[in-house]
Amino acid sequence: MSEQYVDIMLQSLKKKEQVLKEIIDENRRQREILEDVNGKAEDFDATVEAKANLIEQLEQLDSGFQKLFDRMKEELEGNRETYADQIREMKQYIRSVTDKSMEIQAQEARNKDLMTSKFASVKKQVKTMRKSSVAVNEYYKTMSKLNYVDPQFMDGKH
């Protein structure tokens, strides 16, 4: 039975590594969308939603792994020789998961900077468009007054 729990823990770590790879891919897609001048907000939102689902999977995997680890901790520590290969394999996966987590944090920071500059750029464009719109409206108002002649009273005696 203990052997099965250890195998399940290994599978959980493998799955976690895979989910982290998928998050890395979603972060790359986000970066591409943010760097693309014609990037669509809908595409960005789709990546955010996909990442939210992946993060939910990670939380479930972490929770399950922690429960198994708590149950097996004494068994693993007491029989290190018996589980030496599995422990070594778990350590490799944990290192890989940690490396991927660090990569994700770096990607998130870069994407945040890109998003901040993109929002600033969009805000500047909106401000410029608003100023242009006001200028055009003022121009039309001025031009429409040029050809306007106030009504005049005409005396019919002369």
Image: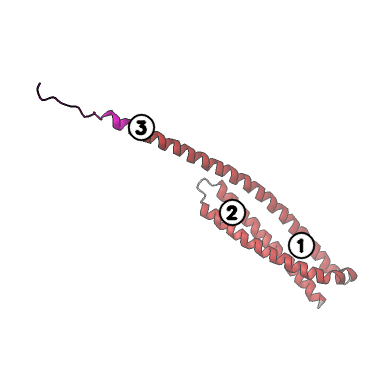
x%, y% of residue 150? Answer: 24, 28
Q: Which residue is under mark 2? A: 29
Q: Residue at x 75, y 57 (%)?
A: 98
* Viewport quadrant of the C terminus: top left
Q: In terms of image quadrants, where is residue 85?
A: bottom right
* Viewport quadrant of the N terminus: bottom right
Identify the amino acid type marked 1: Tyr
Q: Which residue is under mark 3? A: 139
Left or right of 123? Residue 104 is right
Chain part drawn in magenta: 139-158
Q: Residue at x 69, y 63 (%)?
A: 58
**Observer-nearest of 56 and 157:** 157
Counting residues from the start of the chain, the first of labels 3 and 1 encountered is 1
Counting residues from the start of the chain, the first of labels 3 and 2 encountered is 2
C-alpha distance separating marks 3 and 2? 44 Å
C-alpha distance separating marks 3 and 1? 67 Å
Tag count: 3
Identify the amino acid type marked 2: Arg
Crowding at mark 1 (Cα within 10 Å: few <14, some 14-19, many 20+) = some
**Element type at marker 3?**
helix
